[in-house]
Amino acid sequence: DAKTTQPPSMDCAEGRAANLPCNHSTISGNEYVYWYRQIHSQGPQYIIHGLKNNETNEMASLIITEDRKSSTLILPHATLRDTAVYYCIASNYGQNFVFGPGTRLSVLP
Amino acid sequence: GAVVSQHPSWVICKSGTSVKIECRSLDFQATTMFWYRQFPKQSLMLMATSNEGSKATYEQGVEKDKFLINHASLTLSTLTVTSAHPEDSSFYICSAETRSGETQYFGPGTRLLVL
């Protein structure tokens, strides 16, 4: 799996968009970008994944740069319940995930 | 999204005893499940990969005779911590992979405390 780099922490005001960056400059052509989040004392929750096109679902949007070396997870209207550790993972289908330290997002009232 | 359950959600046991943790995919079949461990203030670390009907594959440094994994059906994998010691106290999390291999869904975790 390609290594990913994320900022250790970020703050976001409630109701504003939270933009979480991830660097995966060594990603290979068949590796997808996955985003999960972990709220304290719970298992990771799947958010979204993509290969090269931008993706959107009911939780978030994923913007992947054209060269695929970085991506941004966007939570369009952050709420206090979005406070969590967010993990960006680059992996092939069917492979185990390698978790880094992630980004601790704090949504502030 | 798909649902994965774990049982029990927390367990306290005495040193030297064995503890079994179940991981179930409730609404999909999973030929592959993964077992992770997470110590306080650390990230998830993969322990082993569990394939239905075959032996599990363990990560380097994980003792296969201590952490017994059984994946007897497409919806159930179990992790048994044998002869548990206080240093085995941790948060154990499983994930189940969709049949296409496209993604993994995680269970809520099991917190183990060995006294």
Image (cartoon, coloured by chain):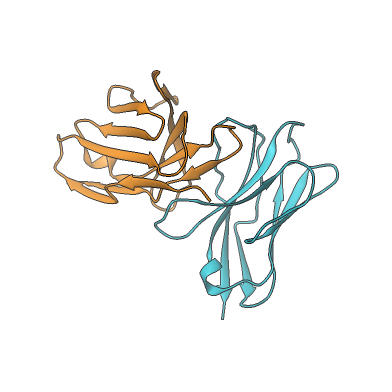
Chain colours: A cyan, B orange
| Residue ranking furthest to the bottom | A109
User: How many numbered circles does the render carry?
Assistant: 0
Q: Front-most of A45 and A85?
A: A45
Left or right, residue A45 beside residue B69: right
User: Residue B57 at what x, y percent from top left?
Assistant: 43, 22
Residue located 68% across and 75% down the image? A16
Q: Front-most of A38 and A56?
A: A56
| Residue ranking furthest to the top | B54
Q: Quadrant of residue A18?
A: bottom right
| Residue ranking furthest to the front | B27
User: Residue B3 at what x, y percent from top left?
Assistant: 45, 48
Q: Front-most of A12 and A73?
A: A73
User: Residue B7 at what x, y percent from top left?
Assistant: 29, 46
Q: Quadrant of residue B48?
A: top left
User: Residue A35 at what x, y percent from top left?
Assistant: 62, 50
Left or right, residue B4 beside residue B6: right
Left or right, residue B15 beside residue B20: left
Question: Does residue A54 sit above or below B31 in this rendering?
Answer: below
Question: Does residue A41 sit above or below A18 in this rendering?
Answer: above
Residue located 73% across and 36% down the image? A27
| Residue ranking furthest to the right | A66
Left or right, residue A65 beside residue A8: right
Residue located 65% across and 52% down the image? A6
Question: Does residue B64 sit above or below A65 in this rendering?
Answer: above
